[in-house]
Image (cartoon, helix red, strand yellow):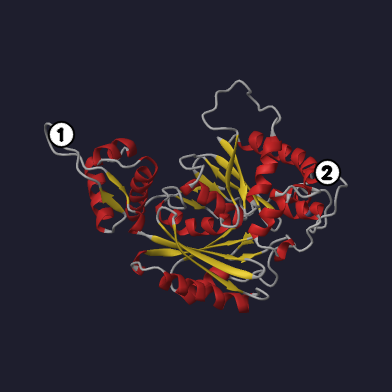
Amino acid sequence: MKAISGTNLEQAKSHNRRVVIEAVRTHGPLSRAAIARMTALTAQTVSNIVEELERSHLLVPAEAQKLARGQPIIPYSINPAGAYSIGLELGRQRASGVLTDLSGTVCARVERQVEEPDPQRAMPALQAIVEDLQQAFIFDTNRLLGVGIALPGRYADGGTTSLSPHSLPGWQDFPVGHSLEQRVRVPVLVENDATAAAIGERLHGVARGLSSFVYLFLAGGGGIGAGMFLDGHLYKGSRNNAGEIGHVIVEPHGRPCSCGKRGCLDRYISPSVAYEFMGIANAGALSPDDLDALIAEGREGLDAWLDQAVEPLRQTVDFLDFAFDPQTIVLGGSIPTSLMRRLAERLEPLHDPLDPGRKRTVPRVMIGMTGKDTAILGAAALPIFSETNPRFDVLQKPLG
Ligand SMILES: [Zn+2]
């Protein structure tokens, strides 16, 4: 159970600062007066915060608009070079990292081969990537907010406890965030890939400005998860496992799943099942671009996979829509773009919503980011989100 805890002055100040950044990020450029109107903060508070944000290079003033009378108006916008972030992703054979600026633009990219990515081999590689990224692009390293890591599967207490066969062996209960933080000496945030991608979509993508959406993440190597924003809050569940819907049974007595059950959603709509249908045995060893090319040429077995995947996907969309009443459901993930496109083309007609006559300002289903960068850009969004989002764990603390 969560409840709003008491806010001390320091927290309120930090909260107001985030509210101002969020207003300018979503609606900018904005003048101080416009920020005050939008945030219901006093003119003096806004003035103080804007001054502080300008000093710390997060906001930049645009050219003043001269008025016939009175003071000229100065609109402020987010300074992309005001802060930087690093996103990391660990695959089965390689570790990759990107450095992005505050707008999510990739400034540098580094990859390293990691044979057997157990913690003993992977942690030095991840550390080296963080160090290389700071050399690969010239920027003020004092502006590095931190490092985000996206890990596949379930995540709890700093380690991974995934059920997926494609998750990484040897990582169970390993405190990845804490361990990397000691090596790189900047804040490290760890999330599962679906939640990280949802945060990326909320910050820079199709869900920008939306307060309630569910992001259905299809992992390129296999695995399905949902990241959820409900009423502006990231919803993670009582044990950080909300959205692990890949193992919901959609076909009683259906195909056996790695989790020991039969008929799980994962075994129908996961990209790894598409590769089985298409007879691509070595999908794990192929680059995402190669996989994209194979799918784009319309390989045999693709239609059969689509035929059996589309109804479980419709049911999932329907269930999420009825259960959470989100503004939209975003489909995305590290799934090859051509595979997601083919699946999305087949999705309509969806099952009827609760209120078919309702006027929608946002489509019921949207296609978000796909392809190999989805999780890593989500990872890079974690430190930015944690630093700038007004509702991220600031005023809400779990009671226990
Ligand atoms: Zn399962």
Residue behind label 2 places its C-beta within 8 angstroms of ligand 1: no
Classify residue 334 by image quadrant: bottom right
Q: Residue furthest front?
A: 297
Classify residue 160 by image quadrant: bottom right
Q: Quadrant of the C terminus?
A: bottom right
Q: Residues within 10 Å of mark 2 (few under 14, many from 20)?
A: some
**Residue 153 visible (yes or no):** no
The spot of residue 380 in percent (x, y) is 49, 59
Q: Residue at x 44, y 73 (%)?
A: 185
Q: Residue furthest left?
A: 69
Q: Secondary structure at mark 1?
A: loop
- Where ligand 1 lies, by image quadrant? bottom right
Report, in whole angstroms, how far the alpha carbon at label 1 lies from the one at label 2: 66 Å
State the residue in front, 199 or 396.
199
Q: Residues within 10 Å of mark 1 (few under 14, many from 20)?
A: few
State the residue in front, 210 or 45.
210
User: Which numbered disc, 1 or 2, marks the residue that appears first in the sequence?
Assistant: 1
Nearer the viewer's eye, disc 1 or disc 2?
A: 1
Report which residue position mark 2 lands on.
Answer: 251
**Residue 305 visible (yes or no):** yes
The spot of residue 171 in percent (x, y) is 66, 70
Q: Secondary structure at mark 2?
A: loop
Q: Residue at x 52, y 50 (%)?
A: 199
The spot of residue 309 in percent (x, y) is 76, 43
Q: Residue at x 57, y 57 (%)?
A: 375
- Amino acid type, mark 2: Glu
- Amino acid type, mark 1: Leu
Q: Which mark is residue 131?
A: none
State the residue in front, 208 or 337.
337
Report which residue position mark 1 lands on.
Answer: 67
Q: Residue furthest top?
A: 357
Residue 206 in the figure: left or right of residue 117: left
